[in-house]
Structure formats: C-alpha cells, structure tokens
Amino acid sequence: MEDVVKIENVSITYAGDKEPVPAVRDIDLAVGRERILGLVGESGSGKSSLVGAMLSLLPASSRIDGHILIDGADLYGLTPKERRAMRGRTVATVSQDPFTALNPVVSIGRQLLEFQHRLAGSRREKLENAKKMLEQVGIADADVRMKQYPHQLSGGLRQRVAIAAALLVRPRLLIADEPTTALDATTEAEVIEIIRDMRGAVDGSIVFVTHDMGVVSRLCDDVAVMYAGELVESGPVAEVMERPRHPYTAALLACDPSRIKTTSGDLPTIPGTVPKPTDLPPGCIFSPRCPKVFARCRREAPALTAAGPSRVACHLIEEADAAA
Amino acid sequence: MPLLEVKDLVVRYPSGTIFDRLKGAPGEVTVLDGVSIAVEAGETLGLVGESGSGKTTLGRAIAGLAPLSGGKIALAGDTVTSRRDRAWKTLRRNVGFMFQDPVAALDPRMRLSSAITEPLAVDAGLLHPISGRKRRRRARELLAEVGLTSDFADRFPHQVSGGQARRVTVARALAMRPKLVIADEPTAGLDLSVQGELLNLLNAIQAADDISFLFITHNLAVARHVTHRVAVMYLGRIVETAPTKTLFSDPAHPYTHALLNAHSPGKPATRLKGEAPSLKIRPTGCEFHTRCPIARDICRREAPPARELGASHTVRCHFPRGHEDLHVEREAKAA
Amino acid sequence: MAIAEDRAAPPETRRPLAESPFAKGFQRMVSSPQGAIAFAVVALLVLGAVFAPLIAPYDPIAIAPRIRFEGPSWAHLLGTDQIGRDLFSRVLYGARVALKVSLFGTTAALSLGAMLGIIAGLGPRWIDSVLVIFCDSVRSLPMILFALAVVAIYGPSMNTLIGVIAFSMAPGYFRVVRNQVLVLRETDFVTAANAMGASRLRVALTHLVPNLIGPLIVLIAMDIPAVIGIESGLSFLGQGIQPPDASWGTMLSDGYSYIRKAPHIAVAAGLPVIVATVAFTFLGEALRDVFDPKSGKGR
Ligand SMILES: Nc1ncnc2c1ncn2[C@@H]1O[C@H](COP(=O)(O)OP(=O)(O)OP(=O)(O)O)[C@@H](O)[C@H]1O
Ligand SMILES: Nc1ncnc2c1ncn2[C@@H]1O[C@H](COP(=O)(O)OP(=O)(O)OP(=O)(O)O)[C@@H](O)[C@H]1O
Ligand code: SF4
Ligand SMILES: [Mg+2]
Ligand SMILES: [Mg+2]
C-alpha cells in the first residue's frame, strides 16, 4: 500500500515570545491511499500545527524539522512557489469555521470559480463543475445557491459549500480541521456523511482533525492520538477504540460521556492539566497524570513501539513484551 | 408550582431593510413562537435542538436579554410580561447566566475578583458601592466554591485557561445565590476531561444549593448524563419535552428521533431531507412537515397541538412515534 | 487528592503576580529600541518644558541687540536670533507652549468626543444619527480656514488655539469612540452586565471606559504631532501665539524671514518640530503594541 502522506520525524517549533515553543515533537505517521485518518487530542496538543505543516501554512517564524512527503514529494524540499501550487491542487482544506472560510461579499458561484483558477478549462466548464460539485455534496438548488452570498446560508449549508470548494480541485489529500465543531448533531451527521460519500472524489486520502471520539469511530479508518505535541498511539480505529493501549487513550475514551452507558452525576476526568510545550516533564510526557506510572516513566521517554496493529509510545508495551 | 414557568413566549426581532419591507417581505422574524417550559426547583432541564432553532434566544429571553413580544415568564412568584416590568429586578437577581464563550463573557480589562462580584455591585447600585475589600473577600469565597485558589482573584481573563475561565463564569453566575442558572453550551469547546470536571462541579453545586439549571447544549451525550428532563426545539417551538430517560429510550417526535439517531454510534443515521426552513417563511401546519419522513396531508394543513403522552411527556406531532393510534382516536372522536 | 492539588496550583497559569499591568506595559513599550528612544525623547521634551524656567540659560524674550544673528556657541547652544534672543531658551519655552496646547487641546477634544461617542453608541438610534451627521459636517470643514475664521472673531491667543483644536479634533475621537462602543456593546461581557441589570451609566463606567482608554491614548500620542503642527502653523501665520512669546511657530516665522542670512534660526525652530513629531509617532506605535490585547496573551 502506497502512502499518500508520510510524516517522518517532524518537529515544529514556534519562535514564541521569550523562548522557542516546541509545539510538535518527533512525529512519525503515514496516511494510506483512500484512507481517512482521524487526528485526535486535547486542545493544544498540536493537531492544528501538524496539519498546518502539511498545508505549509505555518507562520514564517516557525521551524519545521523532519520530512513531510506528499505523494512522494518532500514538501519542504520544494521551492515556496511549488509549495503554493501544491496547496492549491494536491492538498485542499476545510477549516473549522464555516463563517470565515468564505468571503462574505462575493457570491458562492464566483468563489467556486476562483477556487479553480489553477485548473484548465473555460469559465463555462468551471461553473458547470462547481454546480455539479454542489449537487454532489447534497445541495438541492445549486443554481440558486451559486447566486447567493455566504450570510444567506445556514451553518450546515456553508460547511457543505466549503467542502465542495475544497473538492473542486480533486485534491490528493483533503485536510479537515474540526469542520463539525460548530454544528448541531443532525447537521454534523450530514456533513460527516457527505465527507464519507465524497471519498471517491478525493482520489487520495483525508485527514480529519477532531476533539470528538464519536466522530472518529463513525468516519475514520485510522486514528492518531496526540498528547502535548507527541504522538502517543496510532492504529486502525476499531483496534484503538476497542483496545486502547496507551493509558492516555484509555483515559480519554473513559471520559467520553457517549461511551458511558449508565448515567450518574459523577463523570470521570483526567486529573491534572496538559503540560505546556515550554515546560515539559522529564521522561514520558504523560507521566505526571498517568494512573499506571512507574519509575522508568519518569526517567526515560518511551519510543513508539508496534503493539498488535497499533503503534504505542508507552513503557508498558515493552515491559509486557519483555515479560512474554 | 414550578420554579420557572415560561408560557407561550413569543420573541420577534425586526428584520430586513425598509426596501425589503416595501417589497412586501415581513418586517419581523418570529424567533420564538409560543414556547412554554417549566423548570422545577433543583431540576436540570436540558434544551437541545437544531442550531438556529432559538435555544439561546429562549435563555436570553428568560434573562431579560431579548424583547418579549408575547407570553409571560414567572420565576418563584414574580411574573413579567414585558421588558418594562418592575419584577425584572427580583427576577434577574434569581437568575444567573453562563455564556457559551467564557473568555468573551469576561471583560479583558477587569480583574477576576471584580468580574465575579459584578452582580453584587450591580445589585447594590452605583450610589451604594461595595468596598473593594468586601468584594475581594466575597470573590475569594466564590472562587473557593468553584475549586479555584484565591490567587485567581487578581488575574485578568487572559491569564487563565479555558477550563478555568469557565469556572470563573460559574462563580459569577452563583454570586447572587440565584435559584436558576441558565448555562448556554457550557461544555462547548472543552476537552473531554475538563468537560467532566465542569459537569461534576455543576452537579455538586446543585446538590448543595438546590439550584435549578436550564442547560442548553448540542451534546446529547452530555444532556443524557446531567439533565433530569429534556426539551427539544425546532424552528422556534418546543416539539417535545420528556424525562431524560424516556426521551432517549422512546422519542415520540420524528425530529427528536432523527436527532438521537444522528448521534447514536453504529446505527445508520436517518438523514433529514432538505434544509431547515427560514424563520421568515414558516411552513404552514406543523413546522417540521417539510422534512418529516412520516408527514401526511393533515401535517401540512394543521399545526399539531401539544399532547400528553405520559408523566410529563409532551409532544407536538399528529403522529407521535409509538402512539400513532392517538390520531386515529381523535379522528374517530371528531367523526 | 490529585485533583485538589492541581486546582491549587495550575502549572500553566502560575505567574508572578507582583508585576502590575503598568509595569508590564511599560516594560513592553521600551522593549523595542524605537519605543525606548521615543520614550526617552518625549520624556526629555516634557522635562525640558516643565523645568524651562530653571534650565533655560537666558530669558527667552530678553533682547540683546549686540549679539544678533550669532551662530551656535558654548554661550548660546543654538545661537541667537535677529534681536539677540537665545534660541535654546526659546526652544525650551516653545516646547512649553507646544505641549500645553497639545495637552489641553487633545484632552478637551477627547473628553468631548468620548462623551458624545458613548452617548451615541449607547443611546437611541436617532441621537446617534444626529450626532454622526453633525460631527461629519464639522470634520468636513477645512481645518485651517475654520481656525482662521475663529481667530478672526475671538482674536489670537493660546485659549483660542486650544478651543479651535478641541472643537476640530473632537469629531475624530467621537468617531473612534462611537464605533468602538458599537462593537463593545455587542460583546458578551457587556451583555452579561446587562443580564445582571446594570444601568447604561454603569456599563459605560465599568466596561466601556476601561476598554476605550488604551486605544485612545495611542490615538492621542499619534495626534499630538498634528496639534503641534497646527499650533506652529497658526503661529507661523501670525494667528496663534503672538510675539514676543516664544513658540516654535513664531520662531519658524523668524527663521523663514532670515533664511539666507542666518539659516540656523530656521534649523533651531524646525528641528524640535521634527523631533517631537517623530518621537510622538514612534511612541504611539510602541503604545499600540502595548495595548494590543493579542500581544498580551503571549502566544
Ligand atoms: N504561532 C504560535 N506561536 C507560539 N506558540 C504557538 C503558536 N501556534 C500554536 N502555538 C502553541 O502550540 C501548541 C499546539 O497548538 P495547536 O493549535 O497546534 O493545538 P491544537 O491541537 O490544534 O489545539 P486545539 O484543539 O485547541 O485547536 C499550543 O501549546 C499552542 O499554544
Ligand atoms: N438580534 C437578532 N436579530 C435578528 N435575528 C436574530 C437575533 N438573534 C437571533 N436571531 C435569529 O434567531 C434564530 C435563533 O437563534 P438562536 O441563537 O437562539 O439559535 P440557537 O438555537 O441558540 O442556535 P445555535 O445552536 O446555533 O446556538 C436564528 O435564526 C437567528 O438568526
Ligand atoms: S406533525 Fe406530522 S410533520 Fe410534524 S413531526 Fe409529526 S408527523 Fe412529522
Ligand atoms: Mg486546532
Ligand atoms: Mg445558541
């Protein structure tokens, strides 16, 4: 299986006010062809930074180490111009906020036309494409919508238009950064279904950033769990959800109220707070909050180790292997 | 008698330009169209529904932040029917409000000690200011109640995390010892572990002080855990109210059914067809008929009345799920 | 147990609380070289103006016919003018005038503009419309013609100058304040105050004014050069500060008359105008960084 995206030892360091901020550290991850990868983790864990690096959208003052290969091309070995071209054609994005992604004073049709400016074809053909794409994402009266402006559409409709816009260029990689956070349950379900239906249109893969474990299990094939800038566990969705191996993944799943069958007033929490990237604990980053912590965790950072079909960064895995 | 009783509440906002109106478009939108809810003392009522259905507006109306175009709001004996009513003052004192975005709800240039005790200062009035010492002491007590140390008193909002800011707004909502707290999406944007902490905190406060909550949320899983009853809104109306357990096990309204289905993992979602209609052009009859999978002719003609299905289970639908016979009965009676 | 501990000392937000926002703001302002230099220059100007009577080596209006048109020397740092007055002393006294006019002028303009702005922003729609139309018409008056007309009626004096400046600059502040208030009144924290039943006056005092002060201070710093320009301009035209009183404008006017014979007079008068303009502009920019709420978040 050929990977559409390969992330090799990627670290991202922001310049920061006083000191450098190592927001993402040493990530190794691949996204297979025609697979949907869910990227989950608490706020500040570096999800947006990582996808920002894939989109080459990070501030100029940040430093990116390691390699990001998209379709075999090393993103940061390219010239800035080639990178920009790649962003317009090979990689497309749907952002969290359907209110800011679209220009409020330009009609939907015009905007969809402009998204295609790198493609060949006449204006007529492009408009036709845009209309077809709107229909594909489930917008009934595409002709009418093309003449409307973003504020005349509801949140769900707007997010669908944004998805249509992203898919118009037939990207190899679609990156969606929390596209359903602002939507209600029915609308969210719609958008997720559209993304699932649209897999065919992306003849590549999708990276879906979210807070929500439920969304991951409904939509994704693979999942990568980040914590405080590091990858702690990755693997097929069913595997990770059923058999979380990293204590953090397990704790996160335990906190999800939709997975707790009996209702009681007392919900589980993870004691403590996420460490700041500028003030990281020694050893395993999760050790200050980990219920299973032992001496080695505080000394030594665990490496990502294969465990069944998953990969996990936790000393427990090695210990278990050694015991076996 | 319930603590809070909202009866036939109507909220209209002016809309459109003069030119639109000249063209014959309606000059107002009816955001809430005859909403009735009741919250008992010590109860948490969940408010769920489509985005744009008017959940926030209902919360704001109860807090006196939206124009009342009709109906009445009664809280523990104080009844208001218009914005000018004198009873607002006592009503406001008994209602705390938590905004969806806790950081935005705190003045960036105000120390947390002042922010938390602002309700007290407002209540005392400009002419009888409370001394700074007293406010700080009260602020520290309130901070302790929500599990924050007193050194937070001197901080500014940007110096605390999102979860902590949320606790601060809880503290402020509690400052006047209200009988009812309206929480607008209090867990939106929170990480799962922090969300649990906040919900546990609200629970503890309720247990200690017998406070009622009106809990507005998109998150049905959260609603299932922390509410006693749930009201479901669609297009400015309450379409179903039921005890939480009943609602999740036997939703009667087709919209509730779709909403719950959209969320339950595993099952294929029953997708609603089309878009929610615009508030300006309400559908005739039942407002859900344009998207309802089981709509029949009568739905397009006649608005369904609210009916009791069981203990505090009310629904507005001609053909409530599991009670389809009701309609037949009614027709028989009519005939 | 673990939870209680974490709540007691959340690591990510622990900050030294001794630092007052002023100390911090000041630190940030002088943290850039431009900001530090601008602050130093403005401080020198202000000190020079305040202590002019102590510092100035000579009486600024004492005539000394024997030392006319003298170039800079140790005795007369900037030289003397056409009637032998010490230019350095005159520059110091001129700074007094310039700063006095800008301080009183902008303060008056600001108070007027801010008050009307808050009324327009919080009050009923029609008051807002009336005030906006009125202020826009004032703004559309050509400033210098307006000033000349007022001077023609009331006669040239420092008070007239301050009045003219206050009246003509107030609409600018009005605009800024009104627009800011329209934004602020829709913010959640003002809505929250409304939900508590806060009166408009309380909202204005506790929420609007503190949030307006920052941007307004920046604006004032940026506007002071313009005011100095107006003062010098009017005085240059003979419609502002009247000779023999020292003002940078009257000095420029002298320098202009003798530009061929004694260019150092024009230089001595022009230099402070330029230095003050540049310094206040940079100070304004440094202040803008300080008051930018985003820069406070340390992201
Ligand atoms: N421009 C920047 N300069 C300095 N630090 C930054 C910058 N952008 C992000 N960070 C820091 O990097 C870390 C990762 O941020 P990022 O936005 O990638 O997290 P995230 O996982 O997307 O969080 P969320 O779920 O809240 O969107 C955070 O600690 C953040 O404060
Ligand atoms: N001040 C106003 N003027 C005009 N229309 C308004 C105003 N405030 C709200 N509305 C409209 O009222 C409707 C209901 O809004 P409301 O915010 O109450 O919905 P909601 O159920 O809270 O939605 P969400 O779940 O997205 O927060 C929306 O269509 C909105 O556009
Ligand atoms: S009344 Fe009719 S249209 Fe409305 S929800 Fe019930 S079945 Fe559907
Ligand atoms: Mg993010
Ligand atoms: Mg809302």
Image (tube, rainbow, N blue to C red):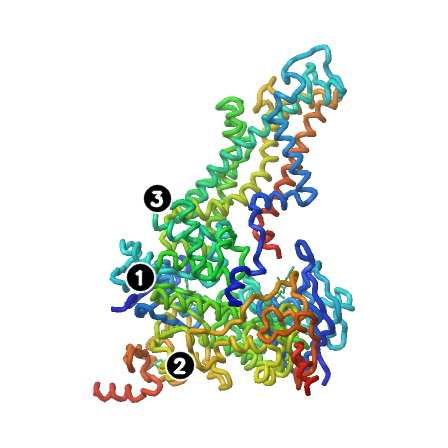
Q: Is residue B100 above or below residue C115?
A: below
Chain identifier of the residue bearing label 3 in the image:
B
Horizontal side of residue A73 vs B227, given as left or right: right
Rendered residue at 38%/62% (across/down):
B60
Same chain assignment for discs 1 and 2: yes
Q: Which residue is mark 2?
A: B248
Compared with B270, B48 (above or below) is above
- What residue lies at 33% left-to-right and 56% top-to-bottom? B93
Which part of the image, by quadrant, shows the N terminus of chain B? bottom left
Q: Are marks 2 and 3 in contact (CB under 8 Å)?
A: no
Q: Which residue is mark 3?
A: B128
Can residue B45 be seen in the rendering of this structure?
yes
Subunit of label 2: B
Q: Are marks 1 and 2 in contact (CB under 8 Å)?
A: no
Q: Which residue is mark 1?
A: B69
Which of the two discs, 2 and 3, labels the residue nearer the N terminus? 3
Q: Is residue B181 left or right of residue A309?
A: left
